[in-house]
Amino acid sequence: MNDSIRFILNGEDIALTDVRPTETLLDFLRLKRRLTGTKEGCAEGDCGACTVLVGRLADGKLAYESVNACIRFVGSLHATHVVTVEHLAGRDGALHPVQQALVDCHGSQCGFCTPGFVMSLYGLWLTTEKPSRRQIEKALQGNLCRCTGYEPIVKAAEQVSQTRPSALFDPLERRRSEIVARLWAMQASGTIRIGNGEDRLIVPASIQALAEILSQEPDATIVAGSTDVGLWVTKQMRRLSPVVFINHLSELQSVTQSEDGITIGAGVSYSGAFAAISKKIPALGRLIDRIGGEQVRNMGTIGGNIANGSPIGDSPPPLIALGATLTLRSLEGQRRIPLEEFFIAYGKQDRRPGEFVESVFVPYPRETSRFAAFKITKRRDEDITAVLGSFLLTLDDAEIVTDIRIAFGGMAATPKRARAVEAELIGKPWTEATIEAARFAFDADFQPLTDWRATAEYRQLTAKNLLTRFYLETVGAPAELKRFEEVA
């Protein structure tokens, strides 16, 4: 039971005792199972041609999410239900309503991307009875099509929501209770270990087992969502061993709210944290909606984004501005530090041998404070950040700045506070003149690099302009661009 990765593929039970730690679900489906409806386009989680659904038990319920098979490792699939486009056909071979709607609305031209669109729309069809235009667009953020212009695909999504056949027609709804029982039976009783030498994967049975494993294997690669690690394999061709998969650990999956803030477990995905964050910190919720596509948000975790330490990670700057606290854990116990102190230098974090990120505590902004996070990219959705600025401002009754925290990503080797700018603003009146006078201080805080996303000059000017934008929004200027459905 503890020497194999076991999951359900469409309707078949799979047990793998010989699997490489970096074998992707896409390669397994296409090369070993000949399920070629799932396509490889970008191999980096951008285009959505490889989209499948993965169902997992959470709190006793079975929930399905769209994911990118190209960067999802087979080792992360234990006790899950993997659903590919081939599974959607009716008992008599008839097209699923989602597929038929794409035919009726001419939503496919060359057809390469179509299976991925089908699976994304199917995931939406399972969870949302009558989706709005915005919900449809959000579900399709992670799917690219170079032929149709998207409008026929959106119309197909609208059409299929109008008439829904009996649940007995749908393969997942029809067999949901059976799938739940089969997944329960697959739960591992202990830690799973597969392989030896340079090809080892480990699936710990508990958070305590994880701590024990990392004490023995301090150089192991910890994988939660693999939205970044997956590219180490598909683009950089790295060999990783051992790989420790943690996305199944319930102890890391909690989102706990208190009067003061939200505690987010390191294994909680962006999608899993979205409801609580968007309700209490709306500006941070809007930022999450622009991180990758739906598939990436379903896989990627806030804890992983922090632990990775990337200077262009989207979650650290706003969390630093909010004053977040990080909890690290090892066999020696827990250690709590301010999040901003975790990032030491490029590629170096304050994580001792055997430690792992357990959770992050995010304080709520005070009612009298004003918070914003601005993500600058070449395209609005599903793009890597060039500059990300976050601001938390507190004024007194006389509109004097009593406290301000400013943090940026994409401006230095790590996510970083703009302390010189903060010092220029604290104690000053919150006016346009104050803002203009403080802009020069960015030159003391940051010396950004030029790369293919932006030049150093562009980044520096953008950072200064984001401070001005934040000021304009706090005084009521309509500075933030709105989508048509948000304005209506």
Image (cartoon, rainbow, N blue to C red):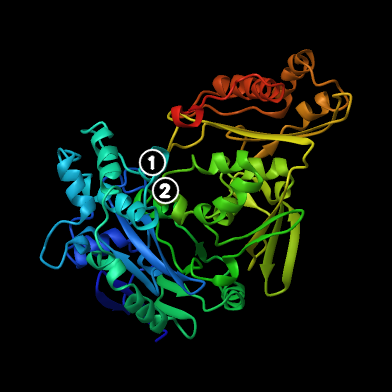
Classify 10 Å Cα crowding around label 1: few (below 14), some (14-19), many (20 and above): many
Question: Pointer 2: what residue?
Answer: 294
Q: CA distance from mark 2 to mark 1?
A: 6 Å
Which comes before the other along the chain, label 2 or label 1? 1
Residue 380 quadrant:
top left
User: Is there any visible trace of residue 152 in the rendered image?
Assistant: yes
Q: Is residue 269 above or below residue 28?
A: above
Dot 2 falls on a residue whose secondary structure is: helix
Give the side of residue 124 with respect to residue 13, left or right: right
Residue drawn 56% across the image and 77% down it: 206
Q: Which type of secondary structure does the marked residue at label 1 adopt?
A: loop
Seen from the viewer's position, the closer of residues 159 and 8 is 159
User: Which amino acid is tagged 2?
Assistant: Glu
Q: Position of residue 143 (x, y in %)?
A: 32, 43
Q: Is residue 314 visible?
A: no
Q: Residues within 10 Å of mark 2 (few under 14, many from 20)?
A: many
Relative to 173, 115 lies left or right: left
Do the numbered discs 2 and 1 sit on residues whose CB atoms are within 8 Å?
A: yes
Horizontal and vertical percent position of residue 17: 32, 80
Residue at the (72%, 19%) spot, across then down: 439
On residue 46, the disc is: none
Q: Nearer the viewer, residue 290 or 157?
A: 157
Q: Tell me what residue is drawn at x 79 percent, y 36 percent.
A: 368
Residue closer to the observer: 38 or 200:
38
Q: Which residue is mark 1?
A: 141
Residue 68's spot in the image, x, y percent? 35, 53
Q: Is residue 268 above or below residue 415?
A: below
Q: Residue at position x 21%, y 64% from top? A: 87
User: Which amino acid type corresponds to the residue marked 1 in the rendered image?
Assistant: Gln
